[in-house]
Amino acid sequence: MIEVAVQDAITIGASTSLIAVVTLTTALVFGLATLACPSRATIAWGVAFGLGLLGTYVWVAAHQMDSPALRAAASGLMICFEPIVWLGLRLHFGKRPVWWPVVAFVLIVPAVLAVTAGTPNFDAAFRVAFLAASIFAALIALELFRSPGPRRDIKLPLALASCAFVIIAVVGAVGALFDHELSLAGQLQVIREVNSVGTLVTGVCAAFTLVMLVRADGSRIDAVALGAVRARRRLQKARAQGEQAWSILDVRLDAPADLRESTTGNGFALIVDRFHDDVVESLPAAADAERVADDRSIVIIHGSDESVQHHVRAMLRRISAIDATGASAGMRLSASVGWASVEAIGYDYDALVAAAEEAALRGRENGGDRWERVKKAPTTLER
């Protein structure tokens, strides 16, 4: 949570309101996300709000005790909210968690602020910590905007609050460098006054977005995350055994926007259900397909080049077959497939998915109803 103002101008009434809002948002996240749908992501978010709540209570106590070191440590606990929320988002969307910067931030920032409190170095230390937290805020917004689901209106509150955090941090840093009329302490006081409101706004926006992420789309996202974990384990085992006959396929329904506009909401849902059923039923039993979006599946498959080609061709034929009944009656669907193999890319799951995604998008741009394989010297292949 954004660092609370550390100055005497804040009244007890404002502090009480801050405690009430932070306590309420923490209870909502714990009750509706962490306890209702326990996962690594929701546990991380629970920890983030728990640290924010602890920091808020410690800050109010330190304000009453007039303890600069305790106030600074509480401020450090509050801005630890940003990196932990970012880590939870990566876990929620099935991406590889990056632990070391988050752990380093949580351990170092509160300690440094507490040690430098009351010294001339505190202002500089706080600015550096605040800028570092803004980097994680920018990463939060990036994760939300890049995620394939859920609806944009769910992601928007936290994304906008994170963007505002970044703007405030950048403006404050620029002001410190070029505004010589206002002292460094005065500039810092202005930022803290803005942050006293930002704490409330960020807490409410984050609670809304994170709870809705879990409640609206949690089961599918959790399934995608588990699928990614299983795929990584398979690839790690393949690396240990020296097996290279593994591939990642990115299967995308062509022209999903046109299909959505030409059908009703329920009709489009039936079309994408049929698309994903066709993907699963055209694959061998040993392959795993995860539905990561309405128009996209990620497949991990084992087999020789000839075997994978056979299954991809069968998949495209099955998807393009015209149904006589149902929502897609009389419609010819098509798909684009990106194929990235361990032999060409390596055993890193994220690198394989990224390469397959680029190939699938290139297939769409080239007219769709095709598959493209990623090679060291890229070659386009059509069915």
Image (cartoon, rainbow, N blue to C red):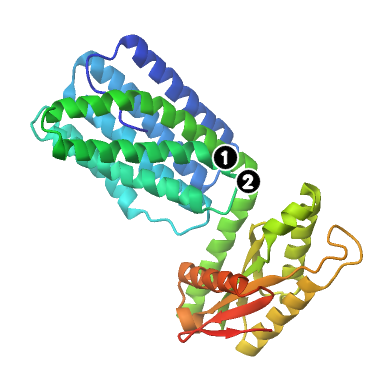
Q: Nearer the viewer, residue 359 or 97?
A: 359
Q: Is residue 321 left or right of residue 300?
A: right
Q: Residue furthest left?
A: 120
Q: Residue at x 53, y 53 (%)?
A: 147
Type of amino acid under label 2 = Asp
Which residue is the site of mark 1? 154
Which residue is the site of mark 2? 217
Number of dots carrying numbers: 2
Disc 2: CA contacts within 10 A as few (<14), some (14-19) or many (>=20)? some
Image quadrant assignment for residue 180: top left
Image quadrant assignment for residue 52: top left
Residue 211 seen: yes
Cβ atoms under marks 1 and 2 closer than 8 Å: yes
Above or below: residue 158 compared with residue 322: above
Name the spot of residue 14 as percent of width and height, x first: 35, 14
Q: Residue at x 47, y 35 (%)?
A: 206
User: In terms of secondary structure, where does tag 1 sit?
Assistant: helix
**Quadrant housing the C terminus:** bottom right
Chain-order first, disc 1 or disc 2: 1
User: In terms of secondary structure, where does tag 2 sit?
Assistant: helix
Q: Nearer the viewer, residue 2 or 26?
A: 2
Above or below: residue 329 compared with residue 71: below
